Amino acid sequence: MKSKRRKIFYVALSILIAATIWFYVNNKESVTVYVHDVPIEFLNEDTSLADKGLMRISGEEETTVDLKLQMPRNVAFYFDTSELHLVSDLSSVTYAGKQSVSYTILLPSNVSSSSVKIESPTIRTTQVEIGELSKKDVEIRCKVVGNVAEGYIAGTIQLLPETLEVRGQQTDIMQISYAQITLDIEDATATVVKLLDYTLYDFNDQPVENKNIHPMSESVQVTMPVLKVKDVPLTVNFIETAGSRLENFTYSLSYSSITLSGDASQMAAIDEITLGTLALEDVHGSETLTYDIPVPDGINNLSGITSVTLSISSGSITSKNVEATHFSYENFSGEHSVSVVTSSLPVTLRGPASDLDAIDGSEVRVIADLSDIAADSGSYTVPARVEVSGYDVGAVGAYEVTVHIG
Protein backbone atom coordinates (compact mmCIF):
# COMPACT_ATOMS: atom_id res chain seq x y z
CA MET A 1 0.00 0.00 0.00
CA LYS A 2 2.86 2.38 0.88
CA SER A 3 4.61 1.57 -2.41
CA LYS A 4 1.47 2.40 -4.36
CA ARG A 5 1.02 5.79 -2.62
CA ARG A 6 4.67 6.64 -3.19
CA LYS A 7 4.29 5.83 -6.88
CA ILE A 8 1.25 8.14 -7.18
CA PHE A 9 3.16 10.96 -5.46
CA TYR A 10 6.11 10.70 -7.85
CA VAL A 11 3.82 10.61 -10.87
CA ALA A 12 2.04 13.80 -9.70
CA LEU A 13 5.35 15.51 -8.96
CA SER A 14 6.63 14.60 -12.42
CA ILE A 15 3.52 16.08 -14.04
CA LEU A 16 3.88 19.31 -12.03
CA ILE A 17 7.55 19.67 -12.96
CA ALA A 18 6.81 19.00 -16.61
CA ALA A 19 4.00 21.57 -16.62
CA THR A 20 6.23 24.15 -14.97
CA ILE A 21 8.99 23.58 -17.52
CA TRP A 22 6.48 23.74 -20.37
CA PHE A 23 4.96 26.99 -19.04
CA TYR A 24 8.40 28.57 -18.61
CA VAL A 25 9.59 27.52 -22.06
CA ASN A 26 6.31 28.54 -23.67
CA ASN A 27 6.36 32.02 -22.04
CA LYS A 28 9.90 32.62 -23.22
CA GLU A 29 8.99 31.57 -26.73
CA SER A 30 9.23 34.50 -29.13
CA VAL A 31 6.07 35.58 -30.94
CA THR A 32 5.46 38.08 -33.73
CA VAL A 33 3.15 41.02 -33.14
CA TYR A 34 1.87 43.15 -36.03
CA VAL A 35 0.68 46.67 -35.38
CA HIS A 36 -0.94 48.50 -38.29
CA ASP A 37 -1.49 52.17 -39.10
CA VAL A 38 0.41 53.72 -36.23
CA PRO A 39 0.36 57.51 -36.80
CA ILE A 40 3.53 59.57 -36.61
CA GLU A 41 3.34 62.47 -34.19
CA PHE A 42 5.36 65.49 -35.30
CA LEU A 43 6.96 67.53 -32.51
CA ASN A 44 7.96 71.22 -32.36
CA GLU A 45 5.82 72.28 -35.33
CA ASP A 46 4.46 75.35 -33.54
CA THR A 47 7.72 76.24 -31.78
CA SER A 48 11.12 75.56 -33.34
CA LEU A 49 9.84 75.03 -36.88
CA ALA A 50 7.49 78.03 -36.76
CA ASP A 51 10.25 80.24 -35.35
CA LYS A 52 12.16 79.57 -38.58
CA GLY A 53 9.17 80.67 -40.69
CA LEU A 54 8.45 77.09 -41.76
CA MET A 55 5.55 74.69 -41.44
CA ARG A 56 4.73 71.10 -42.25
CA ILE A 57 2.23 70.85 -45.08
CA SER A 58 -0.30 68.20 -44.05
CA GLY A 59 -1.76 65.79 -46.54
CA GLU A 60 -5.30 64.55 -46.60
CA GLU A 61 -4.38 61.46 -44.57
CA GLU A 62 -2.22 61.02 -41.49
CA THR A 63 1.25 59.62 -41.99
CA THR A 64 1.08 56.07 -40.59
CA VAL A 65 3.47 53.12 -40.29
CA ASP A 66 2.97 49.34 -40.01
CA LEU A 67 5.19 47.65 -37.43
CA LYS A 68 6.41 44.08 -37.05
CA LEU A 69 7.63 43.30 -33.55
CA GLN A 70 9.19 40.26 -31.90
CA MET A 71 8.75 39.68 -28.17
CA PRO A 72 8.35 36.87 -25.62
CA ARG A 73 4.85 35.48 -25.31
CA ASN A 74 4.53 36.71 -21.72
CA VAL A 75 5.40 40.27 -22.86
CA ALA A 76 2.91 40.08 -25.71
CA PHE A 77 0.25 39.14 -23.16
CA TYR A 78 0.28 42.63 -21.59
CA PHE A 79 1.61 44.64 -24.56
CA ASP A 80 -0.90 47.50 -25.12
CA THR A 81 -0.60 48.66 -28.72
CA SER A 82 -2.64 51.82 -27.97
CA GLU A 83 0.30 53.07 -25.89
CA LEU A 84 2.74 52.64 -28.77
CA HIS A 85 3.84 55.98 -30.24
CA LEU A 86 5.92 57.15 -33.19
CA VAL A 87 7.40 60.64 -32.82
CA SER A 88 9.38 62.78 -35.22
CA ASP A 89 11.18 65.91 -34.01
CA LEU A 90 11.05 68.68 -36.64
CA SER A 91 13.31 71.08 -34.73
CA SER A 92 16.26 70.11 -36.96
CA VAL A 93 14.47 71.06 -40.21
CA THR A 94 15.95 74.26 -41.67
CA TYR A 95 14.57 74.65 -45.20
CA ALA A 96 11.38 74.33 -47.25
CA GLY A 97 10.70 71.46 -49.63
CA LYS A 98 10.21 67.70 -49.56
CA GLN A 99 12.64 65.88 -47.29
CA SER A 100 13.12 62.82 -45.11
CA VAL A 101 12.92 63.04 -41.34
CA SER A 102 13.55 60.28 -38.84
CA TYR A 103 11.10 59.08 -36.24
CA THR A 104 11.47 57.21 -32.97
CA ILE A 105 9.38 54.28 -31.75
CA LEU A 106 8.26 54.71 -28.15
CA LEU A 107 7.14 51.49 -26.48
CA PRO A 108 4.53 51.37 -23.70
CA SER A 109 5.96 52.54 -20.38
CA ASN A 110 5.67 49.08 -18.79
CA VAL A 111 7.65 47.35 -21.56
CA SER A 112 11.44 47.24 -21.59
CA SER A 113 13.08 48.02 -24.93
CA SER A 114 15.42 45.05 -24.38
CA SER A 115 12.49 42.63 -24.50
CA VAL A 116 11.15 43.81 -27.87
CA LYS A 117 12.85 43.49 -31.25
CA ILE A 118 11.64 45.74 -34.05
CA GLU A 119 11.88 43.70 -37.24
CA SER A 120 10.34 46.27 -39.52
CA PRO A 121 10.60 48.92 -40.64
CA THR A 122 14.35 48.83 -40.50
CA ILE A 123 14.69 52.34 -41.93
CA ARG A 124 12.73 54.66 -39.71
CA THR A 125 12.24 57.76 -41.81
CA THR A 126 9.26 59.39 -43.45
CA GLN A 127 8.79 61.95 -46.19
CA VAL A 128 7.44 65.37 -45.21
CA GLU A 129 6.82 68.49 -47.21
CA ILE A 130 7.90 71.72 -45.56
CA GLY A 131 6.49 75.04 -46.75
CA GLU A 132 6.89 78.70 -45.96
CA LEU A 133 4.84 79.71 -42.93
CA SER A 134 2.50 82.72 -43.11
CA LYS A 135 0.56 84.26 -40.23
CA LYS A 136 -2.64 86.27 -40.07
CA ASP A 137 -4.69 87.81 -37.26
CA VAL A 138 -8.41 87.49 -37.95
CA GLU A 139 -11.34 89.20 -36.26
CA ILE A 140 -13.35 87.24 -33.71
CA ARG A 141 -17.06 87.94 -33.95
CA CYS A 142 -19.42 87.06 -31.12
CA LYS A 143 -23.03 86.26 -31.94
CA VAL A 144 -25.21 86.78 -28.87
CA VAL A 145 -28.44 84.79 -28.56
CA GLY A 146 -31.13 85.23 -25.91
CA ASN A 147 -31.76 88.08 -23.50
CA VAL A 148 -30.67 88.73 -19.94
CA ALA A 149 -33.28 88.56 -17.18
CA GLU A 150 -35.69 91.47 -16.67
CA GLY A 151 -34.12 94.29 -14.69
CA TYR A 152 -30.62 93.51 -15.96
CA ILE A 153 -28.47 94.83 -18.78
CA ALA A 154 -25.66 93.20 -20.76
CA GLY A 155 -22.30 94.95 -20.70
CA THR A 156 -19.47 95.06 -23.22
CA ILE A 157 -18.15 91.69 -24.37
CA GLN A 158 -14.51 90.89 -23.64
CA LEU A 159 -12.67 88.26 -25.70
CA LEU A 160 -9.49 86.39 -24.90
CA PRO A 161 -7.68 86.36 -27.26
CA GLU A 162 -9.03 89.54 -28.84
CA THR A 163 -8.04 88.32 -32.31
CA LEU A 164 -7.27 84.81 -33.57
CA GLU A 165 -3.87 84.09 -35.08
CA VAL A 166 -3.96 81.53 -37.89
CA ARG A 167 -0.91 80.00 -39.53
CA GLY A 168 -0.45 78.25 -42.82
CA GLN A 169 0.53 78.87 -46.39
CA GLN A 170 -0.45 82.23 -47.80
CA THR A 171 -2.89 80.72 -50.29
CA ASP A 172 -4.74 78.93 -47.49
CA ILE A 173 -4.97 81.60 -44.80
CA MET A 174 -5.77 84.49 -47.15
CA GLN A 175 -9.30 83.10 -47.60
CA ILE A 176 -10.11 83.48 -43.87
CA SER A 177 -12.21 86.57 -43.10
CA TYR A 178 -13.19 86.04 -39.46
CA ALA A 179 -13.85 83.53 -36.69
CA GLN A 180 -17.30 83.36 -35.11
CA ILE A 181 -18.46 82.19 -31.70
CA THR A 182 -21.99 82.01 -30.30
CA LEU A 183 -22.80 83.12 -26.74
CA ASP A 184 -26.11 82.24 -25.07
CA ILE A 185 -27.16 84.74 -22.35
CA GLU A 186 -30.80 83.73 -21.94
CA ASP A 187 -32.15 84.85 -18.51
CA ALA A 188 -28.65 85.61 -17.20
CA THR A 189 -28.51 87.47 -13.86
CA ALA A 190 -24.74 87.45 -13.34
CA THR A 191 -21.63 87.95 -15.44
CA VAL A 192 -21.31 85.19 -18.06
CA VAL A 193 -17.87 83.63 -18.58
CA LYS A 194 -17.58 80.78 -21.10
CA LEU A 195 -14.91 78.97 -23.11
CA LEU A 196 -16.33 78.62 -26.62
CA ASP A 197 -15.37 76.84 -29.81
CA TYR A 198 -15.28 78.89 -33.00
CA THR A 199 -15.86 78.45 -36.72
CA LEU A 200 -13.72 80.03 -39.43
CA TYR A 201 -15.52 81.87 -42.24
CA ASP A 202 -14.43 83.16 -45.63
CA PHE A 203 -15.29 86.51 -47.20
CA ASN A 204 -18.59 85.08 -48.50
CA ASP A 205 -19.64 84.13 -44.95
CA GLN A 206 -19.16 80.45 -45.70
CA PRO A 207 -17.54 78.09 -43.16
CA VAL A 208 -13.97 77.08 -43.95
CA GLU A 209 -12.56 73.64 -43.14
CA ASN A 210 -8.93 73.26 -44.16
CA LYS A 211 -6.44 71.00 -42.36
CA ASN A 212 -3.60 73.16 -43.65
CA ILE A 213 -4.83 76.13 -41.59
CA HIS A 214 -3.54 76.07 -38.02
CA PRO A 215 -5.25 78.40 -35.50
CA MET A 216 -3.05 79.16 -32.49
CA SER A 217 -5.94 78.94 -30.00
CA GLU A 218 -8.32 76.03 -29.66
CA SER A 219 -11.08 78.11 -28.08
CA VAL A 220 -12.04 81.66 -27.08
CA GLN A 221 -12.82 82.82 -23.55
CA VAL A 222 -15.82 85.16 -23.57
CA THR A 223 -16.77 87.42 -20.68
CA MET A 224 -19.99 89.41 -20.78
CA PRO A 225 -20.85 91.49 -17.70
CA VAL A 226 -24.50 91.22 -16.72
CA LEU A 227 -25.45 94.20 -14.58
CA LYS A 228 -28.44 95.04 -12.40
CA VAL A 229 -30.33 98.16 -13.52
CA LYS A 230 -32.00 100.40 -10.95
CA ASP A 231 -33.61 103.85 -10.74
CA VAL A 232 -32.11 105.52 -7.67
CA PRO A 233 -33.67 108.61 -5.99
CA LEU A 234 -31.54 111.72 -5.48
CA THR A 235 -31.82 113.46 -2.11
CA VAL A 236 -30.38 116.39 -0.15
CA ASN A 237 -29.73 116.12 3.59
CA PHE A 238 -31.53 119.15 5.00
CA ILE A 239 -30.51 120.26 8.52
CA GLU A 240 -33.45 121.74 10.42
CA THR A 241 -33.23 124.10 13.38
CA ALA A 242 -35.75 126.15 15.34
CA GLY A 243 -37.30 128.62 12.93
CA SER A 244 -35.98 126.73 9.89
CA ARG A 245 -38.21 123.72 9.40
CA LEU A 246 -38.34 122.02 6.01
CA GLU A 247 -42.13 122.19 5.99
CA ASN A 248 -41.85 125.96 5.63
CA PHE A 249 -39.60 125.74 2.56
CA THR A 250 -40.35 124.90 -1.04
CA TYR A 251 -37.71 123.15 -3.12
CA SER A 252 -37.21 121.07 -6.24
CA LEU A 253 -34.40 119.14 -7.94
CA SER A 254 -33.78 119.37 -11.67
CA TYR A 255 -33.60 115.53 -11.64
CA SER A 256 -35.23 113.48 -8.92
CA SER A 257 -33.51 110.19 -9.84
CA ILE A 258 -30.93 108.62 -12.11
CA THR A 259 -30.58 105.15 -13.62
CA LEU A 260 -27.57 103.13 -12.47
CA SER A 261 -26.18 99.73 -13.36
CA GLY A 262 -23.67 97.52 -11.62
CA ASP A 263 -23.03 94.22 -9.92
CA ALA A 264 -26.23 92.97 -8.28
CA SER A 265 -24.65 92.82 -4.81
CA GLN A 266 -23.45 96.43 -5.08
CA MET A 267 -26.74 97.68 -6.42
CA ALA A 268 -28.67 96.03 -3.59
CA ALA A 269 -26.89 98.33 -1.12
CA ILE A 270 -27.83 101.54 -2.99
CA ASP A 271 -31.27 102.87 -2.03
CA GLU A 272 -30.59 106.55 -2.70
CA ILE A 273 -27.80 108.99 -3.48
CA THR A 274 -27.32 111.96 -1.15
CA LEU A 275 -26.09 114.96 -3.10
CA GLY A 276 -24.96 116.96 -0.07
CA THR A 277 -25.96 118.61 3.20
CA LEU A 278 -27.71 121.98 3.48
CA ALA A 279 -28.43 123.86 6.72
CA LEU A 280 -31.82 125.50 6.24
CA GLU A 281 -30.88 128.39 8.51
CA ASP A 282 -28.38 129.43 5.83
CA VAL A 283 -31.05 129.75 3.14
CA HIS A 284 -32.31 133.29 2.64
CA GLY A 285 -35.04 133.98 0.13
CA SER A 286 -34.71 131.97 -3.09
CA GLU A 287 -31.46 130.21 -3.89
CA THR A 288 -30.13 127.89 -6.59
CA LEU A 289 -27.41 125.37 -5.74
CA THR A 290 -25.64 122.86 -7.99
CA TYR A 291 -24.47 119.45 -6.76
CA ASP A 292 -22.28 116.89 -8.51
CA ILE A 293 -23.74 113.38 -8.38
CA PRO A 294 -21.41 111.11 -6.35
CA VAL A 295 -21.75 107.79 -8.19
CA PRO A 296 -20.11 104.94 -6.21
CA ASP A 297 -16.98 103.30 -7.64
CA GLY A 298 -17.73 100.40 -9.95
CA ILE A 299 -21.24 101.66 -10.73
CA ASN A 300 -22.30 102.94 -14.15
CA ASN A 301 -24.39 106.08 -14.59
CA LEU A 302 -26.67 105.10 -17.47
CA SER A 303 -28.55 108.40 -17.39
CA GLY A 304 -25.43 110.38 -18.20
CA ILE A 305 -26.50 113.11 -15.76
CA THR A 306 -23.50 114.30 -13.76
CA SER A 307 -24.93 117.24 -11.78
CA VAL A 308 -28.25 118.35 -10.32
CA THR A 309 -29.64 121.81 -9.55
CA LEU A 310 -31.52 122.45 -6.30
CA SER A 311 -33.97 125.37 -6.31
CA ILE A 312 -35.08 126.27 -2.79
CA SER A 313 -37.10 129.12 -1.29
CA SER A 314 -37.54 130.06 2.34
CA GLY A 315 -41.21 130.87 1.66
CA SER A 316 -42.85 132.50 4.69
CA ILE A 317 -39.63 132.41 6.72
CA THR A 318 -38.56 135.93 7.69
CA SER A 319 -36.60 137.68 10.45
CA LYS A 320 -37.32 140.17 13.23
CA ASN A 321 -35.18 142.18 15.65
CA VAL A 322 -36.19 142.20 19.33
CA GLU A 323 -34.59 143.36 22.58
CA ALA A 324 -33.91 140.48 24.98
CA THR A 325 -34.11 141.33 28.68
CA HIS A 326 -34.31 137.92 30.33
CA PHE A 327 -30.96 136.30 31.15
CA SER A 328 -29.77 133.18 32.95
CA TYR A 329 -26.77 130.85 32.89
CA GLU A 330 -25.92 127.12 32.75
CA ASN A 331 -23.01 124.67 33.09
CA PHE A 332 -21.36 126.32 36.12
CA SER A 333 -19.62 123.92 38.51
CA GLY A 334 -18.21 126.41 41.05
CA GLU A 335 -19.54 127.47 44.44
CA HIS A 336 -19.36 131.25 43.93
CA SER A 337 -22.38 133.31 43.11
CA VAL A 338 -23.00 134.21 39.47
CA SER A 339 -24.72 137.26 38.10
CA VAL A 340 -25.31 138.26 34.49
CA VAL A 341 -24.04 141.77 33.96
CA THR A 342 -25.67 142.23 30.55
CA SER A 343 -29.21 143.52 31.01
CA SER A 344 -30.31 144.07 27.42
CA LEU A 345 -29.25 142.38 24.17
CA PRO A 346 -30.46 142.97 20.57
CA VAL A 347 -31.43 139.59 19.06
CA THR A 348 -32.41 138.75 15.49
CA LEU A 349 -35.04 136.04 15.32
CA ARG A 350 -35.89 133.90 12.30
CA GLY A 351 -39.02 131.86 11.69
CA PRO A 352 -42.49 131.87 10.14
CA ALA A 353 -43.91 135.38 9.83
CA SER A 354 -47.01 134.41 11.80
CA ASP A 355 -44.89 133.41 14.81
CA LEU A 356 -42.61 136.44 14.65
CA ASP A 357 -45.58 138.81 14.57
CA ALA A 358 -46.74 137.44 17.91
CA ILE A 359 -43.39 137.88 19.68
CA ASP A 360 -42.70 141.12 21.56
CA GLY A 361 -39.41 140.17 23.25
CA SER A 362 -40.69 139.01 26.61
CA GLU A 363 -40.62 135.41 25.38
CA VAL A 364 -36.91 135.58 24.56
CA ARG A 365 -34.40 134.16 27.05
CA VAL A 366 -30.62 134.47 26.71
CA ILE A 367 -28.70 131.68 28.49
CA ALA A 368 -24.98 132.14 29.17
CA ASP A 369 -22.71 129.08 28.83
CA LEU A 370 -20.18 128.90 31.71
CA SER A 371 -18.70 125.48 30.86
CA ASP A 372 -15.30 127.03 30.03
CA ILE A 373 -15.15 129.26 33.13
CA ALA A 374 -13.10 128.25 36.17
CA ALA A 375 -14.31 128.89 39.71
CA ASP A 376 -12.16 132.03 40.11
CA SER A 377 -13.86 135.32 40.84
CA GLY A 378 -14.08 137.98 38.18
CA SER A 379 -16.01 139.20 35.17
CA TYR A 380 -16.09 137.22 31.92
CA THR A 381 -17.53 137.50 28.43
CA VAL A 382 -19.02 134.12 27.50
CA PRO A 383 -21.07 132.65 24.62
CA ALA A 384 -24.82 132.47 25.01
CA ARG A 385 -27.72 130.75 23.33
CA VAL A 386 -31.20 132.12 22.68
CA GLU A 387 -34.49 130.39 23.42
CA VAL A 388 -37.99 131.58 22.56
CA SER A 389 -40.69 130.04 24.70
CA GLY A 390 -43.83 128.84 22.97
CA TYR A 391 -42.69 129.47 19.39
CA ASP A 392 -40.68 127.50 16.83
CA VAL A 393 -38.30 130.30 15.95
CA GLY A 394 -34.52 130.55 16.20
CA ALA A 395 -31.90 133.20 16.67
CA VAL A 396 -29.68 134.27 13.80
CA GLY A 397 -25.96 134.61 14.50
CA ALA A 398 -23.80 134.17 17.62
CA TYR A 399 -24.26 136.01 20.90
CA GLU A 400 -22.17 136.83 23.96
CA VAL A 401 -22.96 138.26 27.39
CA THR A 402 -20.94 139.42 30.39
CA VAL A 403 -21.15 137.60 33.71
CA HIS A 404 -19.60 138.24 37.11
CA ILE A 405 -18.46 135.48 39.47
CA GLY A 406 -17.73 136.14 43.14
Image: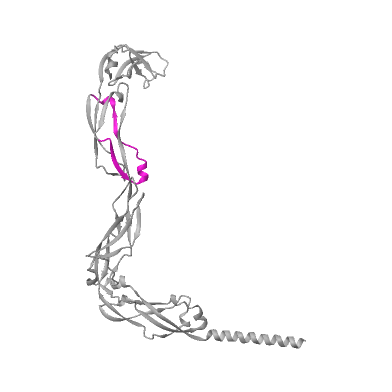
Q: Nearer the viewer, residue 155 or 101?
A: 155
Q: Quadrant of the N terminus?
A: bottom right
Colour convention: one colour
The reply to whether residue 402 is visible in this rendering is yes
Against 176, residue 296 (above or below) is above
Residue extent of the magenta highlight: 255-284
Quarter holding residue 9: bottom right
Q: Which of 14 and 297 is in front in this view?
A: 14
State the image coordinates of residue 148 (x, y, percent, origin top left).
33, 50
Q: Which of 176 and 242 is in front in this view?
A: 176
Against 169, residue 235 (above or below) is above
State the image coordinates of residue 354 (x, y, percent, origin top left).
28, 16
Across the whole image, how many numbered discs are drawn on residues? 0
Residue farthest toward the right in the current orientation of the protein: 1
State yes or no: residue 159 in magenta.
Answer: no
* Lateral position of residue 109 relative to residue 355, left or right: right
Q: In which quarter of the image is the C terminus?
A: top left
State yes or no: residue 261 in magenta.
Answer: yes
Identify the residue shown where x is 35% and y is 48%.
149
State the image coordinates of residue 109 (x, y, percent, origin top left).
46, 75
State the image coordinates of residue 349 (x, y, percent, origin top left).
28, 18
The reply to whether residue 294 is visible in this rendering is no
Quarter holding residue 269: top left
